[in-house]
Image: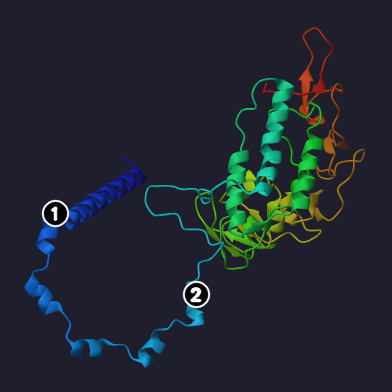
Amino acid sequence: MPVQTDGRRLQRLCAAALIVHLCAACARRTSPEAGATAAPSPEADAAAAPSPEADAAAAPSPEADAAAAPSPEADAAAAPSLAGPAENPAGDEITPVYGKAEGAPEPLAARLCDALHALPARRKAACCGGAAGFQAAAECARALSVAVRARAVTLSTDEVGRCVEAMERSLDGCDWVSPLAAPVPPACEGIVRGALDKGARCRSSLECAGGLRCDGAGPTDAGTCRAPRAAGPCGLSVDALAAVTRQTRYAEAHPECRGHCAGRACTDDVPLGGRCEAHAACGRGRRCVDARCSEAALPPAGAACLGGLCAAGARCVDGRCAAPKAEGEACARDGECRAACVRRARGGAAGGVCGMRCAAP
């Protein structure tokens, strides 16, 4: 049997033994017999009564009162942190880093999460027929509300409004429908802003101020806001809040490494003009073009692709940047269309036309 399984069984057995022990102890302390045995006799009461001399000796002096008074520094140290997440308890029980939220979700958090998750599900159901099915709006609103109430993140009413409007525009019609999740418009990126300083306990990198990363955080573990590391492991965890709020580009504002993550380890960026094999090796804002790190701007639709990349709103198709084709236009592959290249019926012309695809082929 694997060692890990034996370890878990041993933990459970120890926990069970501890519970039995505590229950037995509680039963002994609260049983009638124990109460009767513990009842003091009149003689014991008389012996225990303090004398006037003992009262005088026990009275605190003014000097003792002054020494016992807590200082302002001690009060500050004992004050609970508004944003400090509780540690995951030891044992077999695994709990999410964003625990249960009390009451209704924060209105602004609920509005943002509805636009990111529930709105695409409703629009897709209207196009394809049937129920909307599972979507993560409730989980998103719960986790985001916990972070907002802890004053770990802030949301702007104006920015959330612009995100909602952009999502609604991007979901017009049905030619965007595919088995994949609806893409997030640029207006929805970077709007969950961190409020925690360096050294603060955190649940997500989104909770840390710009430029800081929540080191050690995961779906069930809290971490600490720290500056990007020069060396060490990277790319080993999932950011729970970034995932549910669909902040796909959060690493740009909260980098894990000073350079870049390669092979699960932080590595220095390749200098401008140096030899490269991947875009990430050149660092943020640069690309690997013809095996050299470059700062060249991404080309628009109609221009040749730059290392397989194009400017926002265009895609690289057969070596050239092109805008996604609209519904009904001829196509040969999904990458040419806003949603999918739907094959024509048998006996028709070769290829297909762009349109919606409700399920994977």
- Residue 256 place in picture, x, y as percent: 64, 58
SS type, badge 1:
helix
Residue 16 seen? yes
Apparent side of residue 266 relative to residue 177 in the rendered image (left or right): left
Residue 193 drawn above or below residue 189? below
Q: Is residue 269 left or right of residue 39?
A: right
Which mark, residue 75?
none
Between 271 and 314, the one nearer to me in the picture: 314
Q: Disc 2 marks which residue?
A: 77
Q: What residue type is labelled 2?
A: Ala
Residue sitting farthest toward the left = 43
In this rendering, the label closer to the viewer, 2 or 1:
1
**Quadrant showing the C terminus:** top right
Q: Residues within 10 Å of mark 1 (few under 14, many from 20)?
A: few
* CA separation in Å, label 2 and label 1: 43 Å
Which x, y percent locates residue 61?
33, 91
Q: Which amino acid does label 1 sit on?
A: Pro
Observer-nearest residue: 148 or 175?
Answer: 148
For marks 2 and 1 on the same chain, the one whose residue lies earlier in the sequence: 1
Residue at which label 1 appears? 32
